[in-house]
Amino acid sequence: MFKIFDCHCDTLTKAMWSKQNIYKNNLHIDIEKLNVFEKAIQIFAIWLDRPYLDNAYNNTLKAIDFFNFQIKEYKDYISKDINSKIGAVLSIEGGEAVEGSIEKLINLYEKGIRLMTLTWNYKNQIGCGALSGFEEGLSSFGLDVISKMNELNMVIDVSHLNIKGFWDVYNKSNKPFIATHSNSYTLCNHPRNLNDDQLKAISESNSMVGVNLYPVFVDGDKANLDNIIRHFDYIMNIIGDKKIGIGCDFDGISVCPENINDVTKLDILYNRINEVWGKELANNIFYNNMFNFFKDKI
């Protein structure tokens, strides 16, 4: 089997709210499923649905506690050390978690958060999501967040961010950033995807893209291997083959691609990429590119 480095899943909070564990569950990802790979690094996002946003910081702390308990409970199988067979990295999806406070941002970093998706789809104290505030960029607090994240070496994630906010990140950040789970807008014109100018900016800033498997962002309707490969091909033609990886969005998507209904089925995609571009590029897309980007940040 091959190695994987997946930039985004919503498994952690989904397991927490449904009172499951991350060793074995009925979700797209668990430790048993990740164990089929030669090596796996999974970024687990803390995403809070709207009912939990009124107390976002404390609910994020609860999710961090749940993560730490799971890592301790299953320490023989999973570790925060990315050099272990299964490495787990903690991220936040939605800057509501910091509640307008740089101090809380710092505290979350100290508690192990290494990446933050600035917004989900809607407006928060940092900026506006892809489905809101089309004329607004980052707030003054949002710009302060960028500076502090740079200082902390905390990775900025622009997936879900609106276009104006994206350009504010590009202009403000003095470090590369990432779109952990986004595709090409040219191929699928959903506002969650990245247009060609954004992709060029990602390339110029040595930033990264993780390709999302959610059918709505792949073809607007369905996702089969051919449609997914088109996104890899198109994005690589703009940003090159060293700045791309996978951000599958497992357990955050309501519909999976054809024949890829959990993480164990990623061999289908890996094998197709291997057929089209060869093993070296398949290994780079699935593991090496993201490992090289993150290794000094997590």
Image (cartoon, grey):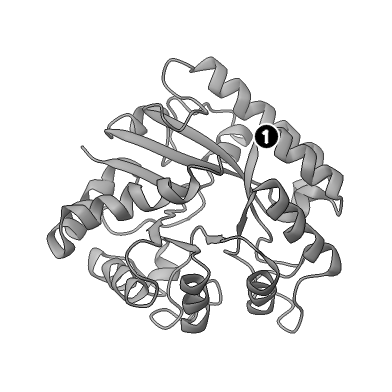
Q: Quadrant of residue 230?
A: bottom left
Q: x, y (%) of residue 288?
A: 34, 48
* Quadrant placement of the C terminus: top right
Q: Is residue 190 above or below residue 67?
A: below
Q: Amino acid at mark 1?
A: Ala
| Residue 124 visible within the image | no
Residue 281 relative to residue 278: left or right:
right
Q: x, y (%) of residue 150?
A: 69, 55
Name the residue at 18% across, 58% down. 272
Q: x, y (%) of residue 120?
A: 66, 61
Name the residue at 54% across, 46% down. 10
Q: Quadrant of residue 15?
A: top right
Name the residue at 23% across, 57% down. 281
* Near-viewer residue (260 or 238): 238
* Quadrant placement of the N terminus: top left
Q: Quadrant of residue 30?
A: top left
Q: Is residue 156 above or below residue 33?
A: below
User: What residue did someone put label 1 on?
Assistant: 63
* Near-viewer residue (122 or 90): 90
Q: Secondary structure at mark 1?
A: helix
Name the residue at 52% across, 28% down. 80
Q: x, y (%) of residue 54?
A: 84, 49
Classed neighbour count for the residue bearing mark 1: other residues with Cα under 10 Å, few (<14), some (14–19), many (≥20): many
Q: Is residue 155 above or below residue 132?
A: above
